[in-house]
Amino acid sequence: MVEAEQAYGQGHAESVVRSQHWRTVENSAAYLAPELRAGTDVLDVGCGPGTITVDIAERVAPGRVVGIDPSEAVLEQARANAAAAGVDNVVFQRGDVFALDAEAAAFDVVHAHQVLLHLVVVHGIGVTPAHPGWTLGFLLLTSFAFTAVVHALNAAFGPKGKFIALVVLVLQLVTAGGTFPWQTTPEVLHPLHKVLPLSYVVDALRQLIYGGTLADAGAAALVLGGYLVAGLLLSTIAAWRQRVWTPQRLKPELAL
Ligand SMILES: C[S@@+](CC[C@H](N)C(=O)[O-])C[C@H]1O[C@@H](n2cnc3c(N)ncnc32)[C@H](O)[C@@H]1O
């Protein structure tokens, strides 16, 4: 069997496991819902803290559900989650997707959520971040900040905002230094490297994945946090200014 903690490239840091705790069939595995009828037996491979597995068990009761994972630490949490939900048709045990036995074929459904991608990244590509928890946290911050900025541009400028977001995206791809050194771009673009957020994302991910300094990543996180706050602020101002409908804003609907 794959060594438990080694198996999971992200590690089972509290922040990582916490991000998996809110998962349910509805918000993470809706594709599976139509297969989950009362009496269906399900094997959940790489179940992690088991919130999806417990939800599956509730839906298929009295069907038998087994969650397997190489990590005893998350299995314990999965058992606690099942107990807290009062679900008794599920068991959690150590197991490895690379060593499934004939018993696996006896289940009606064999399910794996976010396990195959994880295995490709870790075993296929060989990416095992030096700071897995911080990497995940930083990626979440990045997606919040970028979503906030795009939303703000949309809210403030409408369709023109979408175009501005597209232009900024292209400028970021050129100046961030993710695929080639930004110093080789025309000098006129250099200030953009210092200002646009993707440059900070690239730098921080290098530190976090390859084991550089957390201080540099922290500074980048502050910049991203600034973009997040600015995006939320601009959205709020745009929403506040547009809270009153005027005939002019309704014009397209009134034009016959
Ligand atoms: C991204 S988590 C997904 C957890 C859960 N399926 C969910 O979506 O909430 C990936 C899980 O795969 C497990 N895993 C890693 N290597 C595995 C292996 N060889 N066999 C089975 N599970 C594995 C990890 O321990 C981890 O809990």
Image (cartoon, rainbow, N blue to C red):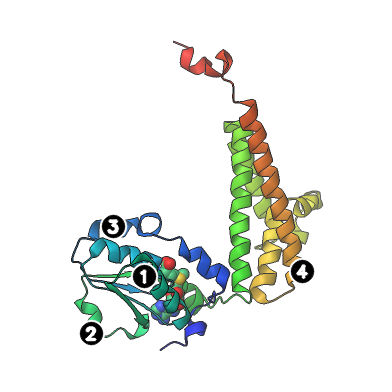
Outermost residue, top side: 256
Q: Earlier in the sequence, mark 3 or mark 1?
A: 3
Residue at the (60%, 43%) spot, across then down: 150
Pointer 3: what residue?
A: 33
Pointer 4: what residue?
A: 215
Q: Earlier in the sequence, mark 2 or mark 4?
A: 2
Kindly check if marks 2 and 1 are in contact, taking CB atoms under 8 A apart as contact: no
Give the distance between the C-alpha atoms of the residues marked 4 and 3, in whole angstroms.
Answer: 44 Å
Asked if the beta carbon under badge 3 is closer than 8 A to the nearest atom of ligand 1, the reply is no
Kindly check if marks 3 and 1 are in contact, taking CB atoms under 8 A apart as contact: no
Give the distance between the C-alpha atoms of the residues marked 3 and 1, in whole angstroms.
Answer: 19 Å
Q: Earlier in the sequence, mark 2 or mark 1?
A: 1
Kindly check if marks 2 and 4 are in contact, taking CB atoms under 8 A apart as contact: no
Disc 1 element: helix
The relative height of residue 247 versus residue 109 in the rendered view (above or below) is above
Q: Which mark is residue 102?
A: 2
Disc 2 element: helix
Give the distance between the C-alpha atoms of the residues marked 2 and 3, in whole angstroms.
Answer: 25 Å
Going by the numbered disc 4, the residue's amino acid type is Ala
